[in-house]
Amino acid sequence: MSARKDRWVSSLVFLLFCVSSIPKCGSASLQQEPSPQHYFSALEAGKTSLAFFTPSVSPGAQPFLEQIESSAEALQDYGVSVVKVNCPKEDVSKYCGKENALRKAFLFRGNRLIREFPTDALFDVNSIVANVLFALLFNEVKYVETLADLENIENVLKGKSNMVFAYVPATGTAEHRAVMEAAFVYGTIHQFVLTTEAALLKATSHDDPDVSSAWLLFCHCQQATEPAQPCRRTALAQPLTLLSIHRHLKLMGAPLVTEVAEDPEKISTVHLQLGLPLVFILSQKETYEADRRTAEFVAWQLLGKAGVALLSRDLVDLNVLQRSNVALKTPEEGMPIQYLVLEDTDEVITLVEDKNKVKQIQEDEQEEEEEDEEEKENNNQDIQDDQVVEAVSRDKKRELPLEQVLVLTEENFHSSLSKAARTVVLFYASWEAVSLAVLRSYSEVASLLKGTPGVLLSRANCWDWPGLCSQENVTQFPTMRIYKEGQQSVTYGGMWGTEELSSFILLSQVSCPLKLATMDEAEGYLRGEFPPELSSHHHTSLLGVFSTATSEAREAFEEAGNILSGHIRMGMYFEDDALSLSRKYSVSPPALLLARSGGRSMESIALSKHSVQDMVQMIRYQLLDIFPEITVSNLPQYLQLGKPFLILFSAGDISQMESEEMLKVAKGRAQQTFVACWLNLKNTPVGHGILRTYFSTMPSLPVLLWVKLHAGGQVFKFPSEQPITEMNILSWLEKLQAGLEIPSSTLSEEDWKPPLPAYDFLQMMEPPVPELSPHPGDTPAQQPSQSPRGDTARGDTATREEPSQESTAEEIGSPGRGLRGTAPRLAARDKQGKRHSEL
Amino acid sequence: LGLALCAGSLCVVSGATFLYHDYCVIGAGPAGLQVAYFFQQAGRDYIVFERSHAPGSFFALYPRHRKLISINKQYTGKSNSEFNLRHDWNSLLSHDRRLLFRHYSRDFFPNADTMVRYLEDFASLLKLQVQYNTAIIHVTLEKNEQAWNGHYFLLTDQDRKNYKCSCLLVAAGTWVPNVVNFPGSEYVEGYETVSINPEDFTGQTVLILGRGNSAFETAENILGVTNFIHMVSRSRVRLSWATHYVGDLRAINNGLLDTYQLKSLDGLLEGDLEDLAIVKDKKGKLHITLRFYLENRNISSDIDSITLPQDELDNFATRAPYDRVIRCLGWKFDFSIYNRSLRMMPGKGNIKKYPQIKPSYESRGTRGLFVLGTASHSVDFRKSAGGFIHGFRYTTRAVHHLLENRHHGVPWPSTVYPITQLTNSIIKRVNEASGLYQMFSVLADIILLRDNATIFEYLEEYPIGVLAELEMQTGRKARNGLFVIIMEYGRNFSGADKDVFYYNRAVGEAQHAWQSNFLHPVIYYYKHLPTEREMRLRHPDWPLPRPDAIHHIVEDFLTDWTAPNAHILPLRRFLENCLSTDLRNFFAESCFLFAFTHEKLPPSCQQGYVRMQGLVGGQELRHHAVQAGLLQDYTHTDFSDDRPPDSHDGSQEQLMRDHGIPVHPLQHLVNAKDE
């Protein structure tokens, strides 16, 4: 029943829109009558007309007449014809004779006068339509002045029909017109009540309302059974327009909760059609009653914002987590349905309201854009969306403390390199954002390393000195290099952070690998005390132990040292007593000793592979921690392993127990197949962003996740009720490997597409001349020869366009040669506006 | 000794009779020396023949009034040497910084003697192989299948010495004066020999034939001492500031336009010189008449019997007699020394003073014969700067690259970059490249995409006329699509008769960039290399065939295209849409987030962060990015709050794309475009 009503309403409204939005679709709607006699004799019973009388000799144009004339079309949609009656000079009848009658308009139904309007009530089309409809819909739209009147009407309606109550600041406004137009359509279904009393507005709305803006309430009186209770009300949240009222009434007419028993992907309701989301409450037979109540409760809360449907899981086979209890379907085409586990109804409501908020913002922005005329196509293309570029340009006014950094030029480059034992050069381009971002870190490095002996920090701007940069083979910006006298320069290949840069520069002070001469040095080196330059620097130390016989391995190690220079502390010992060192740590040369955290733990690795690449890779691998804390700067090292992550998110440091259990898992036989790690949200706050992406609500911390990076991208959450122990973890891992667990989330597979379209200059350039022609008459004649374009063979287009262009030039040229070419451009220019003319 | 014995094709190549070189260059002018420099650098076997005893013999004589009209801008406010070449029209290209013209002259318009001195230094400092006092008087071909091009070039000098080369580069310029023959042309003095002493013209009335820079230069010199000067030529005057063509009349020479338009007796006339005739009266005055009147006459007797135009039309413009008539009609290429087998043909129409060549500067008639320098101007006559030092120094380099590839298997020099550097590499070049700037719409930078557009190869200053032959000419492959970067003026902006100073001529907004009028960079994108057919059938106004997409960088008053929002951002969007990828830069933190939430990473994270070269960014920068709504600040997140903290600032939840997760996208950070 209600569905049919909907359809009826919508088709009527559609019809209404059709006529009202195509103003010229009827014939000329203003009728002219030569005399009052003519007019009155022609009046048909039941037809409504708005007439005004003018003396045939007009005493001057009356502005209100123009407004009446222009309202004729709008009124025609409501069956009201507008008639201009000419008064012959000698006529002294009722309407023509009196002087003041000429300043009024008269509304007739048949030949009965319904109302006369003074001209000051008819100041524009809105006021004319509003007032005429107000007069015609006298019975359908009740006007109230007091709260008591309103309550009376409400009480009468209870149990019978619903009420639409509107406040407008004044009659004759656009809002008034919108309400009257809506009443014209819906007046027979709902009772319309109108007021202009601010007091009534205050009584019906919650907080302090704005009396200057209109307000509309839908009062659900039909369902109200208790006489003492007021009807439930749903306010219209958008500004009052015919469209928004129609939409609101349509939503109010929709069933409160829809019961569905099919795949939610296929369901479509009024809400989705109107661009609102649809919330599914997932129900089961056992909990049906409670779910139904929940659904209704939620539906009342979301009335006008979203639809609510009750989906019975027993009837539909859903491939989602058993625990999911709510689903959200958004109106956007192609968006998947989200299945969520929510704990209370407030969450449902915030979920929807936040969605709407964003949409509302977007709509507002769009409206603003549309107001900007013609700029509609330009959807923010000119707004910077590169975070680095934007950050740098916002920071450009800050002067960088670069006094410590020597500026290199083509002239002083070579002489500067010999000034210090080591010269660090940052090659950059002063217009390039990433360069400038790095230059900021570099200036911090300069102040950190101020006073470090033997290190000179300098910079070379490749925009000023391109010859220098190409001579140094710098093809990318930024590039940092360390030049040492008599040695090959070392190019930096690490993170562009202050810490990493300074550490690199410091480590580069000593040669890599460092040749250790005595046992004492070797021991001191492993403890992190030797060489003294690096004693403040806490890094893992790597010592290669070689016997004199193992030169092949030693050479590879030295080569690897060159590659890893600046990133790792590498030492080398190959004296005769290398054996005693190897005996002490029970390794046989060639071998590596790895001293983590100042020599507190020592590992030894036998060297078997002797190729440089293998050695580098092996050293890199050995430096990785077994159970690291993942940070922004160390993640790439672990990502390169190409394994899934078992990661524990923690709000702060993890507990001893968790740490030990995780370490056991990490060291276990599964070690080779995944990366076990943890993330401290205090140190790496962006972890919140990750969790927020995985879960709709923040899970309780710590939370252990299995993230299948590089392989399907599913994310599994370790059951929060289980304690984090090796046993539990391993059995959970087994279960999820066996496919028995349902992922909580899946990584987006989306490609990184262009964020926004580009200006389509090709399309703009295609029709070359016609639009610019100064003679409007010429254009149509030329168009056919020039318009063919698009995907016709390119050659054809070219040849076809050639002659026509010639002729255009001729034609333009003929009247005044001096202006040829410029006049049409000037004409085109006006349309575009916004150009800088002088400077 | 064996010279007489072996003649013609019977002669087997023998070192005794023919001096052999891989490359022979005719003419040690700027173009000849320029190509010699490149051969020298590449270690090629070459020789330059110069008929005079020193390089640049043309400049030793011309311009007669000794003022070069090529600018020598000493200061630009920039130290970028490549950029500064944009405003140095006299230097040749070399690695030697001493050989910059500003070290030779402080004049904005230098003296021609300075040019001669400069060229001498260029040849000697760089130790170029130039053989002076050798005038090549005949060039012919010798068929030989072993030769690079199927034939050798045989050159003969004035002493009958012979030279043999595999490849001939003609850099002889245009030096044969254009002469018009009409009755009475014997009374005409030539620009080559006319006096340059103004005193010789005191109180005289002068007619000048021609309307180029040499004509105006001659007029300028005597403007103050003559009664009046009239100038006749077939076409209207073309002002270089209206045509942006440096070969048209330059403002420095146009004093006569002033005196004409300011009613000071001097004047310009249009008329075909072929119709002209000059008769001399008894007093030695020269009268202008028309050939047509003379032809009607039977016997060539005295002046009185000749009809003068003013006899019939008594207000005929040039009815006043002249004391002198000077011919300043420019020069043409010397076609005479080439044997017919070389098929060195003059061009058609207004380029008939130049030999016919292809856009690769190779002769249309003979493979292996290249025309360089001024004589090669037919490629871009009245368009670009290929006929002038500041243009042909680049086209000469391009020819050298073509030769290196063709004969020595050295492909066109290129640099390979990761795709993240795409925007940067274009911005760098359009801001500093001088070849693109001087040889606008003729030379182009080419970007060849490789490996599924993850990397690209950058080729500089390739002649776009032979774009279709790119793979063959450069030895580089264009399988994944390409970008062509050129500079263009607005299509209908300039011309001899156009108002180039109208209001609102400058476009300021990036979205209207395609209507830019001043020189600006244009980037063409092709999914496939255009074919020869497409090149041939291109729109006559377009330098290239219709691309798959095109981008104009909006003209800039300072020719500085580094503005982040007006220049770089629209370019990035264009490139992104051509390649269908996201070329934004991201801080390491964003990449970290993407690594855990996306299967794929944007290129800048892929090629930077993942390779441990992430951009960490300091406190301030991150703060700015957060303020701009382009980075989320998670540090203030309260764990106890179960809900996403969306209440404090709507614009913060932005970096994340919305994947069915209640995190709200910032409109301009996410994919607004529906796939």
Image: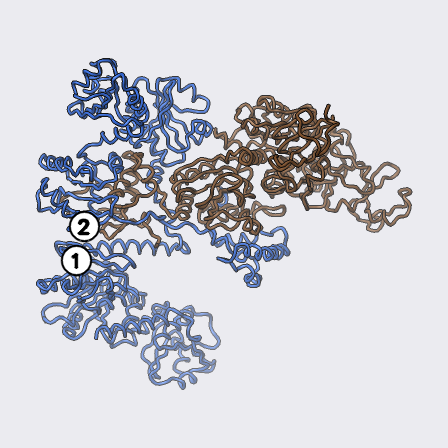
Chain colours: A blue, B brown
- Mark 2 residue element: loop
> Which chain letter matches label 2?
A
Q: Secondary structure at mark 1?
A: strand
Question: Which of labels 2 and 1 is toward the front?
Answer: 2
Residue A112: x and y in percent read 33, 83
Question: Could you classify mark 1 by the number of other residues whose Cα lies within 10 Å: few (under 14), some (14-19), or many (20 or more)?
Answer: many
Residue B273: where, in percent of width, then height? Answer: 76, 44
- Residue B291 rendering spot, x and y as whole percentages: 82, 47
Looking at the rendered structure, which numbered label has been put on residue A199?
A: none
- State whether discs 2 and 1 lie on one chain: yes
Q: Residue at x 8, y 47 (%)?
A: A721
State the residue in front, A640 or B644.
A640
For residue A178, side relative to residue A414 (left or right): left
> Which residue is denoted by mark 2 in the rendering?
A743
Residue A717's x, y, as percent? 15, 47
Query: A607 above or below B542?
Result: above
How many numbered dots are placed on residues in this image?
2
Residue A216 seen from this side? yes
Q: Quadrant of residue A154?
A: bottom left
The residue type indicated by label 2 comes to Pro
Q: In the rendered image, which quarter is residue B282 located in?
A: top right
Farthest bottom residue in view: A41
The answer to whether residue A203 is seen in the rendering is no
N-terminal of the pair, mark 2 or mark 1, is 1
Q: Residue at x 8, y 63 (%)?
A: A286
Mark 2 nearby-residue class (10 Å; few <14, some 14–19, many ≥20): some
User: Which amino acid does the dot numbered 1 rest on?
Assistant: Val
Q: Who's the residue at 34% across and 55% down the image?
A: A366
Please give the label number shown on residue A326.
Answer: 1
Q: Chain of mark 1?
A: A
